[in-house]
Image (tube, rainbow, N blue to C red):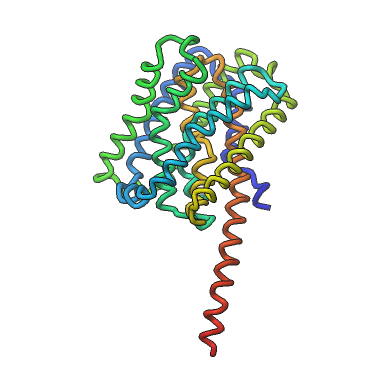
Amino acid sequence: MGFLRIDPMMVKLIITLLLATFIPAKGGFVDFFQYLTTAAIALLFFMHGAKLSREKIIAGSSHWRLHLWIMTSTFILFPILGLLFVWWHPLNISPDLYTGFIYLCILPGTVQSSIAFTSLAGGNVAAAVCAASASSLLGVFISPMLVNLVMNVHSEMPGNGLEQIGKIMLQLLVPFVIGHISRRWIGAWVEKHRSLIGKTDQASILLVVYSAFSEAVVNGIWHKVGLATFGWILLGCLIILAVALLINIVASRVFGFKRADEIVVLFCGSKKSLANGVPMANILFPASTIGIILLPLMIFHQVQLMVCSYIAGRYKAAGEKQAQKEAAPRVMESQK
């Protein structure tokens, strides 16, 4: 029943939402949590930069057709799906939640879970490392530009798109680059303490979610979102993910990718990053709307983990069955 397993991070998100609902940050604590969140996010991207090995990038970067399709799926296919979804307007939800659906569609893919699912399913791990890392890095530039192009948020907040991209580069890309440059000195320590990156990742997300939802609670988010709305959001996430998975499978077979590469396309081309999306939203959107805009992304995060966990298990079982079939004639031959 791995398909039904709840991600521990989702439990922590729910606890954080409850905490923000009953004990929201107010007054001077708002600024305190803002500074703390910025520091945690900078540390997170510094650690990711230090973790990324140039050897792994080189090893996985040679399959250009594979990476081109994954980038196309992440930054072209998904935004088109988001726009079509809003045009179709199938859900009984507020305009801010539809904005949240478009926002999740323009985000880069995940890094850790994409690689983990690729490994579990028996896919091309080196290519997954390269594709997921490239998606996350390019997303720092592409996602805010798509936000301004598709969502036109620059009319709602001070500054323009270039200023927003500059803020994102300063908070996300600069620490990443410094971390990668520092790898020669701290790389061994980072490899030894990989779990620390996961904890920093989760802590930064939870801090931003708490800050965003504290603001949202003060502005009456729970008067706008009920159980029925959560059900509509869940349905929307399932529709978008199912279409993206189907298109990626079909594209992999049309392009003639091997099974190991098809797995990479499936998991790197159909997932969206909570770790990138939450801090970016904190920069791109007005504080009063961040909480409700992030709801579709948080629900999509859990949906993609559950569905992809099930798919990875199916690929693994199929791969083991195929390996047994191929091994049987050799065993029989050796017994003769």
**Residue at position x 68%, y 22% from top?**
89
55 w.r.t. 221: above or below: below
Above or below residue 115? Residue 35 is: above
Residue lying at the far bottom of the rendered structure:
336
For residue 309, above or below residue 17: below
Seen at 68% across and 53% down, the residue is 1
Camera-side residue of 125 and 229: 125
Which quadrant is home to the C terminus?
Answer: bottom right
As drawn, 73 above or below 227: below
Residue 214 visible, this orientation: yes
Residue 272 place in picture, x, y as percent: 52, 36
Q: Residue 45 location, x and y as percent?
A: 38, 35
Q: Position of residue 255 (x, y in %)?
A: 49, 49
Residue at 52% of width from left, 31% of height from top? 206
In the visual, does 238 lie left or right of 118? right
Q: Which quadrant holds residue 301?
A: top right
- Quarter-wise, where is residue 226 in the image? top right
Q: Residue at (67%, 29%) from the top-left corner?
A: 233
Kindly give the residue lying farthest to the right in the view shown.
Answer: 228
Q: Do we see residue 203 in this rendering?
A: no
Question: Would residue 201 appear left or right of 270 to someone viewing this image?
Answer: left
